[in-house]
Image (cartoon, rainbow, N blue to C red):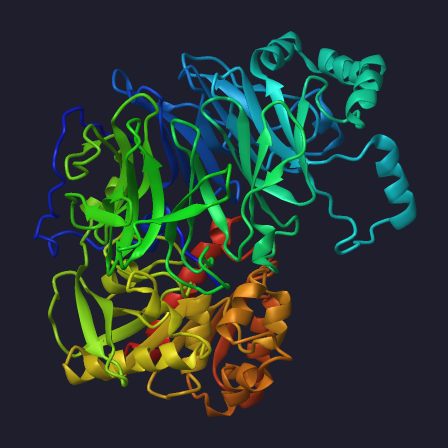
């Protein structure tokens, strides 16, 4: 159910971010084209000495019908410049000496294994390395292997990476002969190998290959005599001949963390099929850097992530994100947690436990201190962690993200945004003063040039006395205005929260709705994170009815307080926001229009199709046969005879988070009932619509039209 998304001017001096100018109404409104033609910051990593940063971005390429993924290099001396230009680079990591950057890319490899492919789209996600001082990127290997995770060795001489154990040529031919195009649902899954490869030898070999002919000759030679030798050693001639197998896993390896002393390698596992059927698939293992059988360290119902070793190699620090369980007992959807673990004994400590919000990212400073991002209410700020204690650091209004420290410097890299301020990457020289920031980027300046909406928090009382909070976003120049047409825009998750952070895409378009004259109400209903574990837990087992009451009571309060015009109410959301929209139009006819996407209308088939099926079963108190009455009573489909609201639906045709067939089922019900509706299906798209920017553009264009058609008057 979870869903959360995300020309340069530089300033060399440290500065405070200042609020937006109040003269908003004099500025023109932003257009849909401008709103979606934006550059998103997906990653930012600080060099070991803290003097440079590599920044990853995602930009729509409207002509190519896809998204570009580029890397940028910032240095104090030269500012920001492009580092790569193929448009397919992600997951950049600095070498320990700061001279190289490794990354994953599916860029086409001429003269190698990709020659069998018709286009670069069918190439492998290989590991590449590029010199920071300048020069072309070089592949670590030419075999057609997808990298699932990688990490530099502490001395920078090697890179560890995980890939699916490949089939030999004979095994592939046998599989084709026996099974043709038949998918063997679980039987064909293979686990991962954790490999270690020397960097300089791999790059030297890549430099020798000057053209397709030599590359083909080398590939052919590797399948011959040298390949035979390697086959005797590793049992598979399709691996790079100098890659050393450190460990094997029966399932996938999702993160790798070598210890600073170079003796051990920790890694996190996950299911090959990427479906959370059992949290026990997600565990931490530790292997010797010299190879051998890996030792399982954790045994719990949590989904561990963000592995970090302490500088003395004695502790493993990690997080368990919100709605991903915990180490304290049976699976529950609680807030994000911080832990550290002694690999020798398996004993763990929960850090920052006194904080009643939700932990997200963290970093370890060179002196061993830990700083973490904590979500509390409508803002995500930085905290210093000392055992169970968490001390809030001085911060700017808004929300921080993307925290990272340098290996040999006290500086930290951080992103910051607010509802009316696009996110940028900043450097904080003093990690304990994240209110003193030097900007490294100035992406998307268009937003500062356009009329900005205004916002304020809003609270109301639920029927059981609980205080519930949300956000009101007003049209530009109308803060505090009354009797406005109101769009109730429900966040996904449900373990998320709307607040003072920027959003500008097809999923998070509240500010565009406000710019188009809507008062936007964003409720943080029961189940949202940032308000304590109890607040999150109260969503179960009433997955939609409990938060649904919170939302309708918020709407009632806004009508009573005079903000919302009761005759011009609309509702919408995507993912879990779609679940809630589908449910609420069965509970009331007050909404004149609804826009919904990727939301289930029943829970039994969705439990079978969802890639987070364990999570679904927890929300509903068991699997379908264990709690059939609740599966039905909490499903919108069985109350659709009450629906009167004109509804616009969208769905990704290849969505495995919420099956496309949930949308088909809902459309059929609306058609049978004669309810005005529209249904858009985006071919080949998953839950996050990651492939073609035109799909998100058309989605948002048509949703705005639908709201204006049925609820604007």
The answer to whether one can see residue 589 in this image is yes
**Residue 61 in view (yes/no):** no
Determine whether, in the image, residue 492 is placed left or right of residue 78: right
Q: How many numbered tags mark residues here?
A: 0
Q: What residue occupies the far front of the structure in this picture?
A: 345
User: Which residue is the extreme one toward the bottom?
Assistant: 641
Q: Is residue 152 left or right of residue 565?
A: right
Relative side of 271 to 40, left or right: right
Q: Nearer the viewer, residue 168 or 74?
A: 168
Image position, residue 560 (x, y; %): 17, 85
In this view, the residue farthest toward the left is 22
Residue 172 position by quadrant = top right
Between residue 65 and residue 122, name the one nearer to us: 122
Which quadrant: the C terminus?
bottom left
Q: Quarter-wise, where is residue 577 in the image?
A: bottom left
Q: Is residue 90 above or below residue 686?
A: above
Q: Quadrant of residue 439?
A: top left
- Residue 226 is situated, as x and y percent measured from the top left of the image, at 80, 14
Q: Position of residue 590 (x, y in %)?
A: 33, 87
Q: Is residue 571 above or below residue 244?
A: below
> Residue, x 41% and y 64% (percent of image)?
492
Residue 147 percent across, percent down from the top left:
60, 34
Write the residue at 34% across / 72% down.
526
């Amino acid at each position: 159910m979870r869903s959360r998304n995300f020309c340069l001017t530089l300033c060399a001096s440290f500065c405070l971010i200042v609020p937006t100018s109040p003269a908003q109404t004099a500025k023109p409104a932003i257009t849909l084209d401008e709103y979606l033609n934006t550059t998103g910051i997906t990653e930012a990593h600080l060099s070991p000495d803290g003097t440079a940063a590599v920044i990853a971005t995602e930009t729509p390429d409207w002509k190519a019908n896809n998204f570009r993924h580029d890397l940028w290099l910032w240095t104090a001396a030269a500012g920001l410049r492009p580092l790569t230009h193929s448009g397919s680079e992600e997951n950049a990591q600095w070498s320990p000496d700061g001279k190289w950057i490794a990354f994953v890319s599916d860029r086409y490899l001429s003269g190698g294994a990709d020659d069998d492919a018709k286009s670069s789209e069918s190439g492998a996600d290989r590991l590449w390395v590029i010199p920071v001082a300048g020069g072309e990127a070089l592949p670590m290997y030419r075999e057609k292997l997808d990298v699932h995770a990688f990490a530099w060795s502490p001395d920078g001489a090697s890179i560890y990476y995980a890939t699916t154990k490949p089939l030999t040529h004979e095994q592939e031919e046998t599989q084709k002969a026996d099974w043709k195009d038949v998918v063997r649902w679980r039987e064909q899954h293979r686990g991962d190998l954790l490999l270690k490869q020397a960097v300089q030898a791999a790059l030297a070999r890549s430099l020798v290959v000057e053209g397709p002919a030599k590359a083909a000759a080398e590939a052919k030679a590797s399948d011959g005599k040298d390949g035979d030798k390697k086959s005797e050693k590793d049992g598979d001639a399709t691996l790079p001949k100098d890659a050393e197998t450190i460990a094997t896993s029966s399932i996938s390896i999702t993160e790798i963390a070598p210890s600073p002393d170079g003796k051990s390698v920790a890694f996190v596992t996950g299911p090959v099929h990427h479906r959370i059927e059992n949290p026990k698939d997600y565990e931490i293992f530790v292997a010797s850097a010299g190879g051998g059988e890996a030792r399982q360290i954790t045994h719990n119902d949590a989904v561990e992530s963000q592995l970090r070793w302490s500088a003395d190699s004695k502790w493993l620090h990690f997080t368990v994100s919100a709605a991903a369980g915990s180490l304290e007992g049976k699976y529950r959807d609680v807030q994000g947690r911080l832990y550290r673990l002694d690999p020798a004994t398996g004993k763990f400590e929960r850090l920052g436990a006194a904080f009643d919000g939700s932990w997200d990212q963290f970093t370890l400073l060179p002196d061993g201190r830990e700083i973490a991002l904590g979500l509390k209410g409508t803002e995500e700020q930085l905290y210093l962690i000392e055992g169970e204690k968490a001390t809030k650091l001085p911060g700017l209004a808004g929300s921080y993200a993307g925290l990272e420290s340098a290996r040999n410097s006290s500086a930290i890299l951080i992103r910051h945004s607010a509802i009316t301020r696009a996110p940028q990457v900043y450097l904080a020289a003093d990690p304990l003063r994240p209110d003193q920031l030097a900007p490294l980027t100035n992406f998307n300046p268009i937003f500062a040039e356009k009329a900005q909406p205004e916002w304020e928090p809003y609270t109301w009382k639920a029927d059981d006395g609980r205080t519930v909070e949300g956000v009101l976003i007003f049209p530009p120049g109308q803060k505090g205005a009354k009797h406005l047409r109101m769009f109730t825009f429900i966040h996904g998750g449900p373990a998320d929260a709307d607040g003072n952070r920027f959003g500008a895409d097809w999923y998070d378009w509240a500010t565009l709705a406000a710019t188009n004259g809507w008062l936007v109400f964003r409720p943080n209903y029961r189940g949202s994170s940032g308000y304590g574990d109890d607040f999150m837990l109260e969503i179960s087992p009433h997955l939609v009815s409990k938060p649904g009451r919170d939302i309708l009571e918020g709407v009632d309060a806004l009508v009573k307080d005079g903000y919302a015009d009761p005759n011009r109410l609309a509702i919408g959301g995507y993912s879990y926001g779609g679940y809630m929209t589908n449910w609420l139009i069965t509970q009331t006819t007050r909404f004149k229009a609804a826009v919904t996407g990727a939301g289930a209308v029943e829970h039994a088939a969705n439990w079978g199709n969802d890639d987070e099926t364990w999570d679904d079963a927890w929300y509903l108190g068991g699997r379908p046969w264990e709690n059939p009455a609740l599966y039905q009573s909490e499903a919108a489909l069985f109350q659709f005879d009450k629906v009167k609201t004109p509804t616009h639906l969208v769905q990704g045709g290849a969505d495995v988070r919420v099956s496309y067939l949930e949308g088909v089922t809902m459309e059929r019900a609306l058609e049978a009932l004669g309810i005005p509706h529209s249904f858009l299906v985006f071919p080949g798209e998953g839950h996050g619509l990651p492939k073609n920017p035109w799909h998100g553009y058309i989605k948002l264009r048509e949703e705005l039209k639908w709201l204006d058609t049925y609820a604007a008057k």
